[in-house]
Image (tube, rainbow, N blue to C red):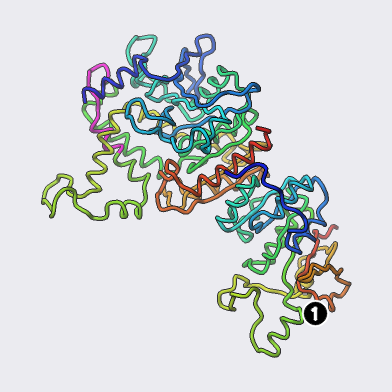
Amino acid sequence: MATTSLSLLQVANGNLPGHLVKMGLDKPLYLDSGKSLSPFVVAYETYGKLNQDHTNAVLVCHALTGDQFAANPHPLTGKPGWWDHMIGPDKILDTNRFFVICANILGGCLGSTGPASINPSTGKPWGLDFPVITISDMVRAQIRLLDHLGIDKLFLAIGGSMGGMQVLDLASRYSDRIFAAVPIAAAPRHSAQNIAFHEVGRQAIMADPDWCQGGYLNNDKCPTRGLAVARMEAHITYLSEPALHRKFGRRLQGREELAFGFDADFQVESYLRHQGSTFVDRFDPNSYLYITRAMDYFDLSEGHNGNLAQAFVGTDVRFCVMSFSSDWLYPTTESRTLVRALNAVAANVSFIEIETDKGHDAFLLDEPEMHRTLSGFIDGCALQMGL
Amino acid sequence: MNTPETPSVMLKSLRHDLRLIAGLIAENCRVLDVGCGDGALLDYLVNHKGSDARGIELSQNGVNACVSRGLSVIQGDADTDLLDYPEQAFDYVVLSRTLQATRQPEVVLSNLVRIGKHALVSFVNFGHWKKRIELLFRGRFPVNGQMVNWYNSQDIHPCTILDFVMICKNLGLTVEEAMTVDSQGTKKTISTNGISANLCGEQAIFLLSRERF
């Protein structure tokens, strides 16, 4: 536990590999809540080289518990980045051709400004004084990063889950800054079920006495048990019943027979406990509250009188929408709703449902069908763009 | 990874009905191909006719084949997914050898001419003399394809040329052009009553539009 907090502390102190840019001193970042951040920091990684015309930039948007370290070994965990199989020379996001950018989201906890950052007006961590943010706010921060990097128009924005929501928000509100958009396993709004699962996770964190009403960083505590429970619960929603059954069944963990107690009898329990306990090493509990809230607030049709199609009127962005057959968190019906809206404005859209039993998390995995479709779509777009 | 240099589809390599359909499509138009398969027609139209072309395809393999050649195709089917498109969104909507597999051919045809200024429909003519002989002398219901039986065929609504002319009339559709094509690729224009085409035509291609008042 000690090494862990030290790692996150080091992050807070800016001892993080990769790029950091402080922006907004002259021009604050205005948020949907009516509040603003000035300054704010964006931590990001890049892979490949920006070409002379600045036309080969790809923005990779990470999901709830992801971060900017999408490729190469992760500096905190030592494991491969969450999309290591996608980003690199001759991979789908070919760094010989593309300049790939991945930024830690606003509200995150790996370098970008979030609730664990220092509030400049108090000199202490923001905690619950941090303004509630939205997916659009995250995208605003990404756009400011693109301005900083001198990129007027992205070749591609791509992401899964919450990353897909950012892609959709970007494509809807900044259609002139993006050529192609790939939202994977995403949805145009958060459903009641999505909100319900998030609320359970938040309640778990807030019920931990070490949460200290959000002020744990000032009290030298951390609600790790609450965060671990939130992670365990969420992790179930990322998988599928067949995948869990295949992986664990009813097999027992390190024992021949039931122990008639409440230790982890079953392998699946042990697995979830492991997921929970390793997660707290790399994630800030308040960040978890803020980011899940941002996802709950997401509804693209809002501001268009509930008419989703209006969010895309006149768009010339090329879309490739992808869903997974066993994803019950952001099911195919959500992607179809999106595709219907795009069709209603005669947008340029491709859509495919990938057959897999791996659930929502399939977007993180080496799914051959997903790779084939993506590589075809991206090559086709690159050809049209002359890359 | 597929190379951008993959040669595009040539006209002569297209299936006969698709070749004739391609010939009926003007340059630089917006085209939707419903049931586009591996995207051969779309590929040809994009590369040789300057079309802004889209597709709908039921099978994951088909969609993948299309998307990986850079075509815009969505997974869906003619019965349910045409409703989503706005009126007159396309210059041409193509439905090649698919009508017989739809649950509601009337609704599908109406949608084709709603979302497209023109509809291009091709189908296998079950009025062809070989099909008639199948039923008359062998006493077996004619089917399409070699490995297909009446009980496992996807073709739940096969029709003849005269049947098709009738549905067009019932729906108030204007037949702008109509032709048959045989397995050698020989094309014949369908005459007014269509009786001889109904006997001798293997496949039919119709160019339709909504009756203008």
Q: Where is B85 relative to B179, above or below?
A: above
Instruction: Give me the residue at 72% from left, 86% from top.
Output: B133
- Quarter location, residue A201: top left
Vertical arrangement, residue A256 with respect to residue A133, above or below: below
The extreme right residue here reads B192
Q: Residue at position x 26%, y 42% from top?
A: A272
The quadrant where residue B129 appears: bottom right
Amino acid type at circle 1 is Leu
Q: Is residue A82 visible?
A: yes
Residue B118 position by quadrant = bottom right
Q: Is residue B62 left or right of residue B10?
A: left
Q: Is residue A25 magenta?
A: no
Q: Magenta residues: mostly which secondary structure? A: helix
Mark 1 Cα shell of 10 Å, populated few (<14), some (14-19), many (≥20): some
Question: In the image, residue A190 lies at what x, y percent?
Answer: 46, 40
Q: Which residue is mark 1?
A: B199
| Screen quadrant of the N terminus of chain A | top left
Q: Nearer the viewer, residue A334 or B211?
A: A334
Point out the stretch of residues depicted in magenta: A217-231
Residue B138 or residue A177, whichever sits in front: B138
Q: Is A298 left, or right, of A215 in this rendering?
A: right
Residue A68: x and y in percent read: 43, 27
Q: Quadrant of the C terminus of chain A?
A: top right
Q: Is residue A81 left or right of residue A370?
A: left
